[in-house]
Image: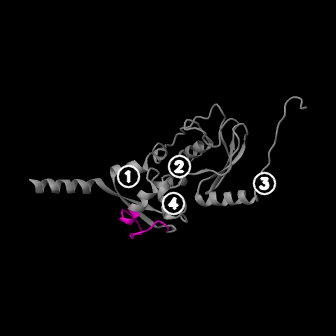
């Protein structure tokens, strides 16, 4: 009957709509809600995100939000989307997390291994070999950023638990043909502190050039 058809359609709709709950940790605290959502849902436009906030399909701590709120640690964001909508706007941003295992995935044999000089809860100082890019210049490139995620996954680091909301990355760059120490941020507080030191020039950088042959 028409009634049964309507009920079945309604039940099907209920089954297809899921709730995604995100608990804010230290790597996101301090961000504006709209800025976080644009990074978390890279396939969604700003207009769509604000529409979902107005319709309460996205809530903050159980209440309606407009996106200007500053996030605090332990805040709860809830997203009510269909599976298809969530997959469409989330894209493949979780792919690297899902592909992680105890074995390293990146082959750096043609460059030489990256050596960890120092590591704590927030940063890694890594020695980049000559030939390896600091950041990708094209999607097919392998970079130090790729090594960083690969290393953290292989070490089962706590930093990999938030890969869907914060992706560890380098703070300074060296040219492809320059080898040396690069600062890698494992956490957002680490990135902020290192970037502040670099910007204020309170961190000294030293370069050594090795010359072969005669210079004119």
The residue lying toward the viewer, choosing from 55 and 25, is: 55
Which of pointers 1 and 4 lies earlier in the amino acid sequence? Answer: 4
Is residue 167 rendered to the left or right of residue 50? right
Name the side, left or right, on which 213 lies relative to 40.
right
Which of label 1 and label 2 is nearer to you?
1
Q: Pick whichever of labels 4 and 3 is earlier in the sequence.
A: 4
Mark number, residue 35: 4
Q: Secondary structure at mark 3?
A: loop
Q: Looking at the picture, does residue 70 appear above or below residue 138?
A: below
Along the line of sight, which residue is nearer the eye, 30 or 6? Answer: 6
Between the residue at mark 1 and the residue at mark 2, the CA separation in whole angstroms equals 27 Å
Q: Earlier in the sequence, mark 3 or mark 1?
A: 1
- Residue 103 in view in this figure: yes
Residue that mark 3 sits on: 204
Q: Which residue is mark 1?
A: 86
Name the one closer to the observer, 215 or 209. 215
Question: Is disc 3 in contact with disc 1, using a CB cutoff of under 8 Å?
Answer: no
């Amino acid at each position: 009957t028409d009634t049964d058809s309507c009920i079945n359609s309604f039940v099907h709709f209920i089954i297809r709509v899921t709730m995604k709950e995100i608990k804010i940790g230290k790597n996101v605290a301090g961000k504006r809600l709209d800025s976080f959502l644009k990074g978390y849902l890279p396939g969604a436009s700003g207009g769509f995100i604000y529409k979902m906030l107005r319709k309460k399909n996205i809530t903050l701590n159980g209440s309606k939000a407009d996106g200007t709120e500053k996030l605090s640690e332990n805040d709860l964001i809830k997203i009510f989307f269909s599976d298809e909508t969530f997959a469409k706007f989330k894209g493949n941003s979780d792919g690297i997390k899902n592909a992680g295992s105890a074995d390293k995935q990146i082959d750096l044999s043609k460059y030489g291994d990256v050596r960890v000089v120092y590591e704590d809860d927030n940063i890694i100082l890594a020695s980049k070999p000559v030939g390896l890019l600091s950041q990708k210049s094209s999607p097919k490139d392998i970079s130090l950023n790729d090594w960083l995620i690969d290393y953290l996954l292989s070490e089962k680091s706590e930093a990999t638990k938030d890969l869907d909301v914060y992706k560890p990355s380098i703070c300074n760059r060296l040219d492809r043909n320059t080898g040396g120490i690069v600062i890698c941020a494992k956490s957002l507080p680490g990135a902020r502190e290192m970037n502040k030191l670099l910007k204020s020039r309170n961190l000294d950088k030293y370069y050594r050039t090795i010359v072969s042959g005669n210079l004119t």
